[in-house]
Amino acid sequence: MSTATLDSTVGTTRPALVHLDDLDIVGIMHNARYALILERAMSEFWAEHGYHFHDGAPSSPDMIAAVREFAITYHAPVRGTGPIQVQFWLDSMGGSSAVYGFRFLSEDGATVFADGRRVMIKMDRTGRPTPWTDQGRAIAAKLMR
């Protein structure tokens, strides 16, 4: 089991709830749910800065992005339902890419359940890589490690 003290100066940390349908047959959080719960935490951060979808339309061209890579290492199982924390930050931001680091922690921040990285590529409506906007970069700077 991996343990660490939560460093609240890195990126942002969001509370999350593990629900019954997030568990697998042996009562631990299903491996596929980590990506979903991370997505929700990241969406919450960006929504707080005015980034959302309404009537199927993005509020910013920076909302058109896709996951290029998702890597995760599991250290300890999340056993059962209840609150956990999701911490994420930006390790780097290129012309059209953003490399996030993340970790899933116990509610008290003392246990790291999993950590990893997620690479996003900003695209235009045709699916070609395109640069992030200046506004998106300014908001993303709040997450830089």
Image: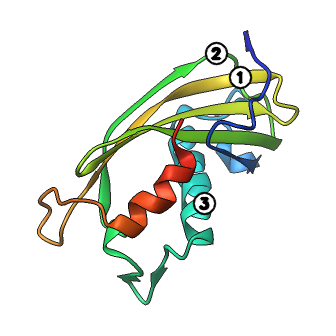
Which residue is the extreme one toward the right? 108
Residue 112: image tag:
1
Which residue is the extreme one toward the bottom? 55
Tell me the kind of residue under disc 3: Phe
Tell me the kind of residue under disc 1: Val
Instruction: Report the Cα–Cα distance between label 3 and label 1.
Output: 21 Å
Q: In which quarter of the image is residue 77?
A: top right
Tell me the kind of residue under disc 2: His
Query: Mark 1 and 2 residues: CB-CB less than 8 Å, in contact?
Result: yes
Residue at the image position 60 percent from the left and 60 percent from the top: 45
Nearer to us: label 3 or label 2: 3
> Which residue is identified by label 3?
45
Instruction: Report the Cα–Cα distance between label 1 and label 2.
Output: 7 Å
Query: Mark 3 and 2 residues: CB-CB less than 8 Å, in contact?
Result: no
> Which residue is identified by label 2?
75
Nearer to us: label 1 or label 2: 1
Near-viewer residue (80 or 130): 130
